[in-house]
Amino acid sequence: MASKQITVGIGIPMIVTGFFIAVFWAPLVGDVEETVEFIGSLIGIMGVIVVIAGLFYTKQQVTA
């Protein structure tokens, strides 16, 4: 069963934040535009990885 808390609570906000950094903030910073675009893209890619991890997350019940 997928973890909705991981997917919705962490992954999607990371994707949105990375998108806004790369698209809207990067053109405003001048000389370091490429670096800010890279960081925004990296945050977005990490968000996608977290979403995928959340989809595959399952709790295991330990019985002794």
Image (spheres, rainbow, N blue to C red):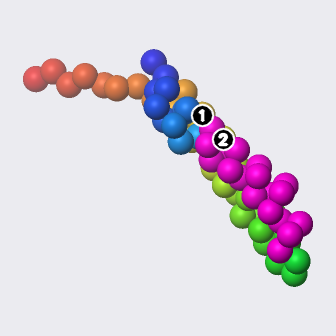
Q: Say which element carries label 1.
A: helix
Image location (x, y in percent) of residue 2: 49, 23
Span colored in magenta: 12-29
Left or right: 63, with 58 as reference point: left
**Residue marked by disc 2:** 48
Left or right: 63, with 3 as reference point: left
Residue at image coords 71%, 52%: 18
Left or right: 45, with 6 as reference point: right
Image location (x, y in percent) of residue 5: 46, 31
The label on residue 52 is 1
Disc 2 and disc 1 in contact, CB within 8 angstroms? yes
Residue at image coords 87%, 81%: 31
Left or right: 56, with 46 as reference point: left
- The answer to whether residue 13 is visible is yes
Report which quarter residue 55 is drawn in.
top right
Q: Say which element carries label 2.
A: helix
Amino acid found under the numbered disc labelled 2: Val
- Magenta region, main secondary structure: helix
Distance in Å between CA atoms under marks 2 and 1: 6 Å
Amino acid found under the numbered disc labelled 1: Ile
Residue at image coords 83%, 57%: 24
- The answer to whether residue 47 is visible is no
Q: Is residue 23 magenta?
A: yes
Image location (x, y in percent) of residue 17: 68, 50
